[in-house]
Image (spheres, coloured by chain):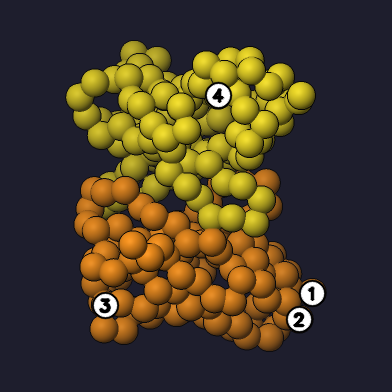
Amino acid sequence: EAGVAQSPRYKIIEKRQSVAFWCNPISGHATLYWYQQILGQGPKLLIQFQNNGVVDDSQLPKDRFSAERLKGVDSTLKIQPAKLEDSAVYLCASSLGVPDTQYFGPGTRLTVL
Amino acid sequence: AQSVTQPDIHITVSEGASLELRCNYSYGATPYLFWYVQSPGQGLQLLLKYFSGDTLVQGIKGFEAEFKRSQSSFNLRKPSVHWSDAAEYFCAVGAGGNKLVFGAGTILRVKS
């Protein structure tokens, strides 16, 4: 069974630029999550989707971050404009349902200069 | 609000020695508890989970964890550490709606 796929693996941008990350969850998983992991910290949930709908985006900085999950499968997380403090690893995870084990992708490491 | 405390930022053990990583949580209801491991440049891999039932949970790679409700703890143990166990370990509690709240992690170093 294929795992959670993410791309790109690494991205370096300058502040005020925009960036997008892509995630393809495990086939059949209805729930998809985006986490932000700042160096030295545990992952923090940014947004959770159940199929196409947003379940929890309470910790998403909505003035600069946006996410969508079209057709209930792939998802894209966007940052516009990026700030220095957005440098982090962005992890995507998926689960069959709720509650259930979350399976994580390899992450995208973002560096904002 | 839910929270997870991992008191040890770094732990160093000798290869072959036993290991215990501490985890304390704060959550009002019956928690779902997880341990994940993260190697450098990798995503998080699930070691084990507790949803209900037997409070001693067996996981992959020889790890186990014990849920102690009275102490709000979910400590991870392994009887004999291998050099390949060197990584960062995260404890997490499943809050409402399957949201995971993670601790800050414990970095395990294994010396030969």
Q: Secondary structure at mark 3?
A: helix
Left or right: B80 with respect to B95? right
Q: Which residue type carries mark 2?
A: Glu
**Tag 3 residue:** A72
Q: Is residue A56 visible?
A: no
**Tag 4 residue:** B21
Question: Which mark sits nearer the N-terminus, 2 or 3?
Answer: 2
Q: Secondary structure at mark 2?
A: loop
Where in the figure is residue B28, as x and y percent of width and height?
A: 30, 31
Q: CA distance from mark 2 to mark 3?
A: 31 Å
**Tag 2 residue:** A14
The quarter of the displayed image where residue A86 is located: bottom right
Look at the numbered discs 1 and 2 and tell me whether their residues touch, using CB distance below 8 Å.
yes
**Tag 1 residue:** A113
Q: Chain of mark 2?
A: A
Q: Which chain is yellow?
A: B
Left or right: A96 with respect to A69? left
Q: Relative to B72, is B60 above or below?
A: below
Q: Which residue type carries mark 4?
A: Leu
Q: Residue placed at 76% from the left, 24% from the top?
A: B112
Query: Which label lies toward us, 4 or 2?
Result: 4
Q: Relative to A23, is B25 above or below?
A: above
Q: Residue placed at 36% from the left, 52% from the top?
A: A102
